[in-house]
Amino acid sequence: MRDFNQNKTPFFTKLKEFGMSHAAPFDVPGHKLGRIENDLQKFVGKKMYLLDSNAPVGLDHLSCPTGVIAEAQNLMAEAMGADRSYFLTNGTTTGILAMVLSVCKANDKIILPRNVHKSVINGLILSGAMPIFIKPNIDELIGIANDVSFDEVKKAIDENTDAKAIFIINPTYFGVVSDLKRITDYAHLHNLVVMVDEAHGAQFYFSHKLPYSAMEVGADISATSMHKTAGSLTQSSIILTQGNRIDHQQLRASLNMLQSTSPSSLLMASLDVARKTMYFQGKTKINNVLKLAKIAREKLKNVPGISVIDKDYLLNQGCYDYDETKLMVKVSDLGLSGFDVYQIMKKNYNIQLELAESHIILCVLTIGTTKQDLERLVLALKKLAEKYHKLKDKLPKIEFRYQFPDPYARPRDAYHAPKHLVKLEDAVDEISAESIMIYPPGIPIIIPGEIITEAVVRDIKFYKEKGGALQSDIDNDTDIDYVQIVDKENWIKYEGDLI
Ligand SMILES: Cc1ncc(COP(=O)(O)O)c(C=O)c1O
Protein backbone atom coordinates (compact mmCIF):
# COMPACT_ATOMS: atom_id res chain seq x y z
CA MET A 1 0.00 0.00 0.00
CA ARG A 2 1.31 3.45 -0.89
CA ASP A 3 1.81 5.86 1.99
CA PHE A 4 0.89 9.38 0.95
CA ASN A 5 2.03 11.23 4.04
CA GLN A 6 3.85 14.15 2.41
CA ASN A 7 5.45 15.04 5.74
CA LYS A 8 7.68 12.01 5.36
CA THR A 9 11.08 12.06 3.68
CA PRO A 10 11.78 8.30 3.52
CA PHE A 11 15.07 8.42 1.65
CA PHE A 12 16.56 11.42 3.47
CA THR A 13 15.50 10.05 6.87
CA LYS A 14 17.11 6.66 6.26
CA LEU A 15 20.24 8.25 4.80
CA LYS A 16 20.64 10.47 7.86
CA GLU A 17 20.15 7.45 10.13
CA PHE A 18 22.87 5.55 8.28
CA GLY A 19 25.25 8.53 8.29
CA MET A 20 24.87 8.97 12.05
CA SER A 21 24.96 5.24 12.88
CA HIS A 22 28.75 4.99 13.29
CA ALA A 23 28.89 2.10 10.83
CA ALA A 24 32.41 0.88 10.01
CA PRO A 25 32.50 1.57 6.26
CA PHE A 26 34.23 -1.07 4.14
CA ASP A 27 32.28 -0.03 1.04
CA VAL A 28 32.76 2.81 -1.42
CA PRO A 29 32.90 5.84 -1.63
CA GLY A 30 36.50 6.00 -0.54
CA HIS A 31 36.15 9.08 1.65
CA LYS A 32 34.54 6.65 4.14
CA LEU A 33 31.79 8.97 5.41
CA GLY A 34 34.23 11.87 5.62
CA ARG A 35 37.08 10.13 7.43
CA ILE A 36 39.57 11.91 5.19
CA GLU A 37 40.60 15.53 5.11
CA ASN A 38 40.63 17.68 2.03
CA ASP A 39 39.90 21.29 1.19
CA LEU A 40 36.27 20.68 0.28
CA GLN A 41 35.61 18.66 3.43
CA LYS A 42 37.14 21.44 5.53
CA PHE A 43 34.96 24.01 3.82
CA VAL A 44 31.59 22.24 3.85
CA GLY A 45 32.13 20.16 6.98
CA LYS A 46 31.89 16.47 7.67
CA LYS A 47 28.12 16.26 7.55
CA MET A 48 27.90 16.50 3.78
CA TYR A 49 30.25 13.51 3.53
CA LEU A 50 28.15 11.58 6.06
CA LEU A 51 25.28 11.81 3.60
CA ASP A 52 27.31 10.72 0.60
CA SER A 53 26.82 6.94 0.54
CA ASN A 54 26.69 4.51 -2.30
CA ALA A 55 24.15 1.77 -1.56
CA PRO A 56 24.47 0.61 2.05
CA VAL A 57 22.00 -1.85 3.58
CA GLY A 58 18.53 -0.33 3.85
CA LEU A 59 19.02 2.48 1.37
CA ASP A 60 17.53 0.74 -1.68
CA HIS A 61 18.79 0.80 -5.31
CA LEU A 62 17.84 3.45 -7.84
CA SER A 63 18.17 0.93 -10.67
CA CYS A 64 15.51 -1.35 -9.15
CA PRO A 65 13.85 0.45 -6.23
CA THR A 66 11.69 -1.47 -3.79
CA GLY A 67 12.41 0.31 -0.48
CA VAL A 68 12.97 3.91 0.59
CA ILE A 69 13.73 5.16 -2.95
CA ALA A 70 10.48 3.61 -4.20
CA GLU A 71 8.63 5.27 -1.30
CA ALA A 72 10.23 8.65 -2.02
CA GLN A 73 9.41 8.32 -5.73
CA ASN A 74 5.78 7.47 -4.90
CA LEU A 75 5.49 10.57 -2.72
CA MET A 76 7.00 12.66 -5.52
CA ALA A 77 4.51 11.25 -8.03
CA GLU A 78 1.60 11.99 -5.71
CA ALA A 79 2.80 15.54 -5.02
CA MET A 80 3.08 16.21 -8.75
CA GLY A 81 -0.22 14.60 -9.77
CA ALA A 82 1.52 11.81 -11.69
CA ASP A 83 1.10 8.03 -11.58
CA ARG A 84 4.83 7.36 -11.27
CA SER A 85 8.08 9.23 -10.83
CA TYR A 86 11.70 8.27 -11.45
CA PHE A 87 14.59 10.06 -9.73
CA LEU A 88 17.40 11.27 -11.98
CA THR A 89 20.89 12.14 -10.83
CA ASN A 90 22.22 13.48 -14.11
CA GLY A 91 19.66 16.18 -14.74
CA THR A 92 16.78 16.46 -17.16
CA THR A 93 19.36 15.77 -19.86
CA THR A 94 19.23 12.08 -18.89
CA GLY A 95 15.47 12.23 -18.54
CA ILE A 96 15.10 13.55 -22.08
CA LEU A 97 17.48 10.96 -23.51
CA ALA A 98 15.60 8.18 -21.71
CA MET A 99 12.17 9.48 -22.79
CA VAL A 100 13.15 9.62 -26.45
CA LEU A 101 15.05 6.32 -26.33
CA SER A 102 12.23 4.44 -24.64
CA VAL A 103 9.47 5.72 -26.92
CA CYS A 104 11.18 5.93 -30.34
CA LYS A 105 12.99 3.23 -32.25
CA ALA A 106 15.23 3.98 -35.23
CA ASN A 107 13.31 5.79 -37.98
CA ASP A 108 10.19 6.34 -35.85
CA LYS A 109 8.91 9.83 -36.48
CA ILE A 110 8.87 12.34 -33.65
CA ILE A 111 7.30 15.79 -34.05
CA LEU A 112 9.14 18.53 -32.19
CA PRO A 113 9.89 22.25 -32.27
CA ARG A 114 13.32 23.16 -33.62
CA ASN A 115 14.20 25.32 -30.58
CA VAL A 116 14.79 22.26 -28.36
CA HIS A 117 17.70 21.82 -25.95
CA LYS A 118 20.70 19.92 -27.29
CA SER A 119 19.81 16.85 -25.18
CA VAL A 120 16.79 16.29 -27.44
CA ILE A 121 19.01 16.32 -30.52
CA ASN A 122 21.29 13.83 -28.76
CA GLY A 123 18.20 11.72 -28.02
CA LEU A 124 17.53 11.66 -31.77
CA ILE A 125 21.09 10.53 -32.41
CA LEU A 126 20.94 7.76 -29.81
CA SER A 127 17.51 6.47 -30.82
CA GLY A 128 17.82 7.06 -34.56
CA ALA A 129 14.38 8.69 -34.53
CA MET A 130 13.36 10.81 -37.51
CA PRO A 131 12.63 14.41 -36.47
CA ILE A 132 9.70 16.25 -38.01
CA PHE A 133 10.55 19.79 -36.99
CA ILE A 134 7.89 22.43 -36.40
CA LYS A 135 8.91 26.05 -36.69
CA PRO A 136 8.40 27.83 -33.37
CA ASN A 137 6.98 31.34 -33.21
CA ILE A 138 9.89 33.70 -33.48
CA ASP A 139 10.02 37.15 -31.94
CA GLU A 140 12.21 39.12 -34.34
CA LEU A 141 12.23 42.15 -32.08
CA ILE A 142 13.90 40.41 -29.18
CA GLY A 143 15.55 37.61 -31.15
CA ILE A 144 14.18 34.56 -29.36
CA ALA A 145 12.13 31.51 -30.34
CA ASN A 146 8.93 30.97 -28.35
CA ASP A 147 6.02 28.52 -28.36
CA VAL A 148 4.57 26.43 -31.17
CA SER A 149 1.08 27.27 -32.40
CA PHE A 150 -1.64 24.64 -32.25
CA ASP A 151 -2.20 25.06 -36.01
CA GLU A 152 1.44 24.22 -36.80
CA VAL A 153 1.24 21.18 -34.53
CA LYS A 154 -2.05 20.05 -36.09
CA LYS A 155 -0.58 20.41 -39.58
CA ALA A 156 2.48 18.32 -38.61
CA ILE A 157 0.29 15.61 -37.05
CA ASP A 158 -2.11 15.56 -40.02
CA GLU A 159 0.80 15.24 -42.45
CA ASN A 160 2.50 12.54 -40.37
CA THR A 161 -0.24 10.27 -39.14
CA ASP A 162 2.37 7.52 -38.68
CA ALA A 163 4.36 9.61 -36.14
CA LYS A 164 5.10 7.91 -32.84
CA ALA A 165 5.43 10.89 -30.53
CA ILE A 166 5.30 14.63 -30.10
CA PHE A 167 7.74 16.56 -27.94
CA ILE A 168 6.78 19.92 -26.38
CA ILE A 169 8.73 22.39 -24.21
CA ASN A 170 6.78 23.60 -21.15
CA PRO A 171 7.98 26.35 -20.75
CA THR A 172 10.85 27.47 -22.98
CA TYR A 173 13.96 28.76 -21.21
CA PHE A 174 12.43 32.22 -21.53
CA GLY A 175 9.13 31.16 -19.91
CA VAL A 176 6.77 30.88 -22.87
CA VAL A 177 4.34 27.97 -23.10
CA SER A 178 2.30 26.45 -25.92
CA ASP A 179 -1.34 25.36 -25.64
CA LEU A 180 -0.27 22.03 -24.18
CA LYS A 181 -3.79 20.86 -23.33
CA ARG A 182 -5.09 21.27 -26.88
CA ILE A 183 -1.92 19.78 -28.35
CA THR A 184 -2.10 16.78 -25.99
CA ASP A 185 -5.76 16.11 -26.77
CA TYR A 186 -5.15 16.27 -30.52
CA ALA A 187 -2.00 14.14 -30.33
CA HIS A 188 -3.83 11.50 -28.28
CA LEU A 189 -6.63 11.39 -30.86
CA HIS A 190 -3.91 10.26 -33.27
CA ASN A 191 -2.29 7.86 -30.78
CA LEU A 192 0.89 9.87 -30.36
CA VAL A 193 2.81 9.75 -27.10
CA VAL A 194 3.10 13.27 -25.64
CA MET A 195 6.53 13.92 -24.08
CA VAL A 196 7.28 17.17 -22.34
CA ASP A 197 10.50 18.99 -21.47
CA GLU A 198 9.80 20.69 -18.14
CA ALA A 199 13.42 21.55 -17.35
CA HIS A 200 12.13 25.03 -16.48
CA GLY A 201 8.65 24.08 -15.26
CA ALA A 202 8.87 22.26 -11.91
CA GLN A 203 7.16 25.23 -10.23
CA PHE A 204 4.01 24.75 -12.37
CA TYR A 205 3.12 21.75 -10.19
CA PHE A 206 2.74 23.87 -7.09
CA SER A 207 0.77 26.98 -8.11
CA HIS A 208 -2.42 27.70 -10.02
CA LYS A 209 -1.11 31.16 -10.83
CA LEU A 210 1.36 29.63 -13.30
CA PRO A 211 0.71 27.86 -16.61
CA TYR A 212 -0.53 24.24 -16.63
CA SER A 213 1.90 21.43 -15.91
CA ALA A 214 2.27 18.47 -18.27
CA MET A 215 0.58 16.09 -15.84
CA GLU A 216 -2.37 18.48 -15.33
CA VAL A 217 -3.21 18.48 -19.04
CA GLY A 218 -2.88 14.73 -19.52
CA ALA A 219 0.55 14.46 -21.19
CA ASP A 220 2.12 11.00 -20.93
CA ILE A 221 5.64 11.73 -19.74
CA SER A 222 7.69 14.71 -18.59
CA ALA A 223 11.30 15.32 -17.60
CA THR A 224 11.41 17.99 -14.91
CA SER A 225 14.42 19.77 -13.41
CA MET A 226 13.56 20.02 -9.72
CA HIS A 227 17.02 21.54 -9.31
CA LYS A 228 16.35 24.53 -11.54
CA THR A 229 13.23 25.93 -9.91
CA ALA A 230 12.14 23.74 -7.00
CA GLY A 231 15.10 23.94 -4.64
CA SER A 232 16.89 20.57 -4.96
CA LEU A 233 20.61 20.24 -5.70
CA THR A 234 22.03 20.75 -9.18
CA GLN A 235 21.58 17.69 -11.46
CA SER A 236 18.64 16.28 -9.48
CA SER A 237 15.64 15.89 -11.76
CA ILE A 238 12.68 13.56 -12.20
CA ILE A 239 10.66 11.82 -14.84
CA LEU A 240 6.89 11.85 -14.33
CA THR A 241 4.46 9.57 -16.12
CA GLN A 242 0.75 8.86 -16.23
CA GLY A 243 -1.69 6.71 -18.17
CA ASN A 244 -0.98 3.60 -20.21
CA ARG A 245 0.98 4.83 -23.23
CA ILE A 246 4.39 4.46 -21.57
CA ASP A 247 6.18 1.11 -21.54
CA HIS A 248 7.76 1.19 -18.09
CA GLN A 249 10.08 -1.73 -18.73
CA GLN A 250 11.50 0.04 -21.76
CA LEU A 251 11.78 3.29 -19.80
CA ARG A 252 13.55 1.53 -16.91
CA ALA A 253 15.90 -0.16 -19.38
CA SER A 254 16.77 3.20 -20.96
CA LEU A 255 17.33 4.85 -17.59
CA ASN A 256 19.52 2.02 -16.41
CA MET A 257 21.55 2.28 -19.60
CA LEU A 258 22.12 6.01 -19.16
CA GLN A 259 22.41 6.52 -15.40
CA SER A 260 25.40 5.77 -13.23
CA THR A 261 25.34 2.60 -11.13
CA SER A 262 26.54 4.86 -8.29
CA PRO A 263 23.79 7.52 -8.18
CA SER A 264 24.43 10.35 -5.74
CA SER A 265 22.58 9.87 -2.44
CA LEU A 266 22.92 13.59 -1.75
CA LEU A 267 21.04 14.40 -4.93
CA MET A 268 18.30 11.88 -4.19
CA ALA A 269 17.93 13.19 -0.62
CA SER A 270 17.69 16.71 -1.99
CA LEU A 271 14.80 15.62 -4.25
CA ASP A 272 13.03 14.04 -1.29
CA VAL A 273 13.21 17.17 0.86
CA ALA A 274 12.55 19.64 -1.99
CA ARG A 275 9.30 17.75 -2.72
CA LYS A 276 8.18 18.09 0.90
CA THR A 277 8.97 21.82 1.02
CA MET A 278 7.27 22.55 -2.29
CA TYR A 279 4.22 20.46 -1.31
CA PHE A 280 3.61 22.40 1.91
CA GLN A 281 5.06 25.81 1.12
CA GLY A 282 5.31 26.03 -2.67
CA LYS A 283 1.98 27.77 -3.26
CA THR A 284 2.59 30.54 -0.71
CA LYS A 285 6.20 31.05 -1.70
CA ILE A 286 5.41 31.16 -5.42
CA ASN A 287 2.64 33.72 -4.72
CA ASN A 288 5.21 35.78 -2.91
CA VAL A 289 7.77 35.60 -5.69
CA LEU A 290 5.11 36.56 -8.24
CA LYS A 291 4.34 39.65 -6.15
CA LEU A 292 8.03 40.55 -5.97
CA ALA A 293 8.38 40.05 -9.73
CA LYS A 294 5.43 42.35 -10.33
CA ILE A 295 6.98 45.09 -8.19
CA ALA A 296 10.32 44.75 -10.02
CA ARG A 297 8.59 44.96 -13.41
CA GLU A 298 6.71 48.09 -12.30
CA LYS A 299 9.95 49.73 -11.16
CA LEU A 300 11.73 48.90 -14.41
CA LYS A 301 8.82 49.80 -16.69
CA ASN A 302 9.62 53.46 -17.19
CA VAL A 303 13.41 53.31 -17.14
CA PRO A 304 14.59 54.90 -20.42
CA GLY A 305 16.48 52.53 -22.72
CA ILE A 306 15.27 49.22 -21.29
CA SER A 307 11.97 47.38 -21.76
CA VAL A 308 10.49 44.70 -19.60
CA ILE A 309 9.27 41.78 -21.72
CA ASP A 310 6.14 40.93 -19.79
CA LYS A 311 3.11 38.68 -20.21
CA ASP A 312 1.03 41.38 -21.97
CA TYR A 313 3.79 41.93 -24.52
CA LEU A 314 4.20 38.20 -25.19
CA LEU A 315 0.47 37.52 -25.45
CA ASN A 316 0.22 40.41 -27.92
CA GLN A 317 2.94 38.70 -29.97
CA GLY A 318 0.69 35.63 -30.15
CA CYS A 319 2.30 33.51 -27.43
CA TYR A 320 -0.12 31.17 -25.65
CA ASP A 321 0.88 31.85 -22.03
CA TYR A 322 3.83 32.96 -19.90
CA ASP A 323 5.52 31.94 -16.66
CA GLU A 324 5.84 35.18 -14.73
CA THR A 325 8.59 33.82 -12.48
CA LYS A 326 10.89 34.64 -15.40
CA LEU A 327 12.07 38.22 -15.67
CA MET A 328 13.16 39.16 -19.18
CA VAL A 329 14.53 42.61 -19.95
CA LYS A 330 15.35 43.99 -23.38
CA VAL A 331 18.60 45.93 -23.16
CA SER A 332 19.70 46.27 -26.78
CA ASP A 333 18.13 49.73 -27.16
CA LEU A 334 20.98 50.91 -24.92
CA GLY A 335 23.40 49.99 -27.71
CA LEU A 336 24.55 47.00 -25.66
CA SER A 337 23.93 43.37 -26.40
CA GLY A 338 22.49 41.08 -23.73
CA PHE A 339 25.94 39.44 -23.62
CA ASP A 340 27.55 42.80 -22.74
CA VAL A 341 25.03 43.41 -19.97
CA TYR A 342 25.49 39.88 -18.62
CA GLN A 343 29.22 40.59 -18.15
CA ILE A 344 28.77 44.15 -16.83
CA MET A 345 26.24 43.04 -14.24
CA LYS A 346 28.66 40.50 -12.80
CA LYS A 347 31.76 42.67 -13.04
CA ASN A 348 30.34 45.97 -11.81
CA TYR A 349 27.45 44.90 -9.57
CA ASN A 350 28.25 41.29 -8.59
CA ILE A 351 24.91 40.19 -9.98
CA GLN A 352 24.80 36.80 -11.68
CA LEU A 353 22.15 36.60 -14.40
CA GLU A 354 20.79 33.34 -15.81
CA LEU A 355 21.52 34.04 -19.44
CA ALA A 356 21.90 36.58 -22.18
CA GLU A 357 20.80 36.67 -25.78
CA SER A 358 21.52 39.33 -28.38
CA HIS A 359 18.77 41.67 -27.22
CA ILE A 360 17.78 40.48 -23.79
CA ILE A 361 18.86 39.28 -20.39
CA LEU A 362 16.97 36.66 -18.41
CA CYS A 363 16.62 36.38 -14.64
CA VAL A 364 15.09 33.25 -13.12
CA LEU A 365 13.09 33.89 -9.95
CA THR A 366 12.26 31.04 -7.60
CA ILE A 367 11.11 30.42 -4.04
CA GLY A 368 14.70 31.30 -3.05
CA THR A 369 14.58 34.81 -4.55
CA THR A 370 14.63 37.58 -1.95
CA LYS A 371 13.23 41.12 -2.00
CA GLN A 372 16.72 42.47 -1.27
CA ASP A 373 18.28 40.71 -4.24
CA LEU A 374 15.55 41.98 -6.57
CA GLU A 375 16.05 45.51 -5.25
CA ARG A 376 19.77 45.21 -6.04
CA LEU A 377 18.95 44.03 -9.55
CA VAL A 378 16.51 46.88 -10.19
CA LEU A 379 18.97 49.46 -8.91
CA ALA A 380 21.83 48.07 -10.99
CA LEU A 381 19.72 48.02 -14.15
CA LYS A 382 18.62 51.60 -13.50
CA LYS A 383 22.24 52.73 -13.08
CA LEU A 384 23.34 50.85 -16.17
CA ALA A 385 20.48 52.30 -18.23
CA GLU A 386 21.24 55.82 -17.03
CA LYS A 387 24.89 55.50 -18.09
CA TYR A 388 24.40 53.87 -21.48
CA HIS A 389 21.19 55.62 -22.53
CA LYS A 390 23.25 58.80 -22.97
CA LEU A 391 25.80 56.96 -25.14
CA LYS A 392 23.41 54.87 -27.14
CA ASP A 393 23.63 56.87 -30.38
CA LYS A 394 27.38 56.35 -30.42
CA LEU A 395 27.10 52.58 -30.03
CA PRO A 396 26.34 50.20 -32.92
CA LYS A 397 22.74 49.08 -33.32
CA ILE A 398 22.21 45.43 -32.36
CA GLU A 399 20.61 43.50 -35.18
CA PHE A 400 19.83 39.86 -35.26
CA ARG A 401 17.59 37.74 -37.45
CA TYR A 402 16.52 34.42 -36.00
CA GLN A 403 16.41 31.45 -38.38
CA PHE A 404 16.87 27.70 -38.44
CA PRO A 405 18.56 25.83 -41.29
CA ASP A 406 16.98 23.08 -43.42
CA PRO A 407 17.49 19.43 -42.49
CA TYR A 408 19.15 17.15 -45.03
CA ALA A 409 19.63 13.88 -43.14
CA ARG A 410 18.67 12.26 -39.86
CA PRO A 411 20.92 13.56 -37.07
CA ARG A 412 22.07 9.98 -36.46
CA ASP A 413 23.10 9.48 -40.11
CA ALA A 414 25.25 12.60 -40.04
CA TYR A 415 26.68 11.69 -36.64
CA HIS A 416 27.89 8.31 -37.94
CA ALA A 417 29.03 9.58 -41.34
CA PRO A 418 32.71 10.08 -42.16
CA LYS A 419 33.56 13.69 -41.41
CA HIS A 420 36.25 16.32 -41.39
CA LEU A 421 36.91 19.81 -40.11
CA VAL A 422 36.74 22.84 -42.39
CA LYS A 423 37.12 26.55 -41.74
CA LEU A 424 33.79 28.13 -40.82
CA GLU A 425 33.87 30.33 -43.95
CA ASP A 426 34.29 27.26 -46.16
CA ALA A 427 31.40 25.34 -44.64
CA VAL A 428 28.57 27.01 -46.57
CA ASP A 429 26.30 24.43 -48.31
CA GLU A 430 27.99 21.57 -46.46
CA ILE A 431 26.14 19.17 -44.11
CA SER A 432 26.95 19.72 -40.47
CA ALA A 433 28.20 16.75 -38.46
CA GLU A 434 28.03 18.54 -35.12
CA SER A 435 25.85 20.76 -32.94
CA ILE A 436 26.93 24.35 -32.34
CA MET A 437 25.11 26.50 -29.83
CA ILE A 438 25.17 29.35 -27.38
CA TYR A 439 25.22 27.90 -23.85
CA PRO A 440 23.00 28.66 -22.08
CA PRO A 441 20.30 28.25 -23.49
CA GLY A 442 21.82 25.31 -25.41
CA ILE A 443 19.46 25.53 -28.38
CA PRO A 444 21.66 24.47 -31.30
CA ILE A 445 22.16 26.96 -34.15
CA ILE A 446 23.01 23.95 -36.29
CA ILE A 447 22.64 20.20 -35.65
CA PRO A 448 24.10 17.10 -37.34
CA GLY A 449 22.36 16.57 -40.67
CA GLU A 450 21.43 20.21 -41.33
CA ILE A 451 22.78 22.26 -44.19
CA ILE A 452 25.12 25.06 -43.14
CA THR A 453 23.84 28.17 -44.88
CA GLU A 454 25.40 31.61 -45.21
CA ALA A 455 22.95 32.73 -42.52
CA VAL A 456 24.31 30.11 -40.11
CA VAL A 457 27.88 31.29 -40.70
CA ARG A 458 26.78 34.89 -40.29
CA ASP A 459 24.99 34.10 -37.01
CA ILE A 460 27.99 32.26 -35.57
CA LYS A 461 30.22 35.19 -36.49
CA PHE A 462 27.73 37.60 -34.96
CA TYR A 463 27.74 35.68 -31.68
CA LYS A 464 31.53 35.50 -31.75
CA GLU A 465 31.79 39.23 -32.21
CA LYS A 466 29.19 40.01 -29.54
CA GLY A 467 30.66 37.68 -26.93
CA GLY A 468 27.89 35.07 -26.98
CA ALA A 469 29.01 31.92 -25.15
CA LEU A 470 29.48 29.70 -28.21
CA GLN A 471 30.00 25.97 -27.67
CA SER A 472 30.71 23.03 -29.88
CA ASP A 473 29.96 19.51 -28.65
CA ILE A 474 33.17 18.15 -30.17
CA ASP A 475 35.98 20.33 -28.86
CA ASN A 476 36.92 23.41 -26.87
CA ASP A 477 36.96 25.75 -29.86
CA THR A 478 34.66 28.40 -28.39
CA ASP A 479 35.62 30.69 -31.29
CA ILE A 480 34.19 28.14 -33.73
CA ASP A 481 36.95 28.82 -36.27
CA TYR A 482 36.36 25.32 -37.63
CA VAL A 483 33.27 23.16 -38.01
CA GLN A 484 32.90 19.46 -38.48
CA ILE A 485 31.11 18.55 -41.70
CA VAL A 486 30.04 15.33 -43.37
CA ASP A 487 32.62 14.07 -45.86
CA LYS A 488 30.16 13.78 -48.75
CA GLU A 489 32.63 12.04 -51.08
CA ASN A 490 32.98 9.09 -48.73
CA TRP A 491 29.50 9.07 -47.36
CA ILE A 492 27.00 6.39 -48.11
CA LYS A 493 23.74 7.70 -46.82
CA TYR A 494 21.83 4.96 -45.07
CA GLU A 495 18.49 6.12 -46.44
CA GLY A 496 15.65 3.84 -45.42
CA ASP A 497 17.92 1.51 -43.48
CA LEU A 498 16.63 0.53 -40.06
CA ILE A 499 19.62 1.49 -37.99
C1 LIG B 1 14.94 23.54 -22.27
C2 LIG B 1 15.91 22.66 -21.55
N1 LIG B 1 15.74 21.34 -21.56
C3 LIG B 1 16.58 20.50 -20.92
C4 LIG B 1 17.67 20.98 -20.22
C5 LIG B 1 18.58 20.02 -19.52
O1 LIG B 1 18.32 20.07 -18.15
P1 LIG B 1 19.40 19.66 -17.05
O2 LIG B 1 20.33 20.82 -16.91
O3 LIG B 1 18.57 19.42 -15.82
O4 LIG B 1 20.10 18.44 -17.52
C6 LIG B 1 17.89 22.37 -20.18
C7 LIG B 1 19.03 22.90 -19.45
O5 LIG B 1 19.28 24.07 -19.37
C8 LIG B 1 17.00 23.22 -20.87
O6 LIG B 1 17.20 24.54 -20.88
Image: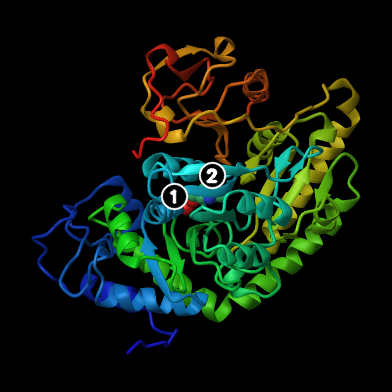
* Relative to 266, residue 479 above or below: above
Element under disc 1: helix
Q: Dot 1 corresponds to which residue?
A: 93
Residue 177: x percent and y percent?
Answer: 68, 58
Q: Dot 2 corresponds to which residue?
A: 117
Pointers 1 and 2 in contact (C-beta within 8 Å): yes
Q: Is mark 2 within 8 Å of ligand 1?
A: yes
Hey, which quadrant is residue 253 in on the image? bottom left
- Taking 182 as reference, is 70 left or right? left
Q: Quadrant of the N terminus?
A: bottom left
Amino acid type, residue under disc 1 in the picture = Thr
Mark before the other along the chain sequence, 1 or 2: 1
Hey, which quadrant is residue 102 in on the image? bottom left
* Relative to 423, residue 228 above or below: below
Q: Quadrant of the C terminus?
A: top left
Residue at position x 35%, y 65% in the image: 268
Residue 78: x percent and y percent?
Answer: 46, 80
Q: Residues within 10 Å of mark 1 (few under 14, many from 20)?
A: many
Q: Is mark 1 within 8 Å of ligand 1?
A: yes
Q: Report the coloring of the rendering.
A: rainbow
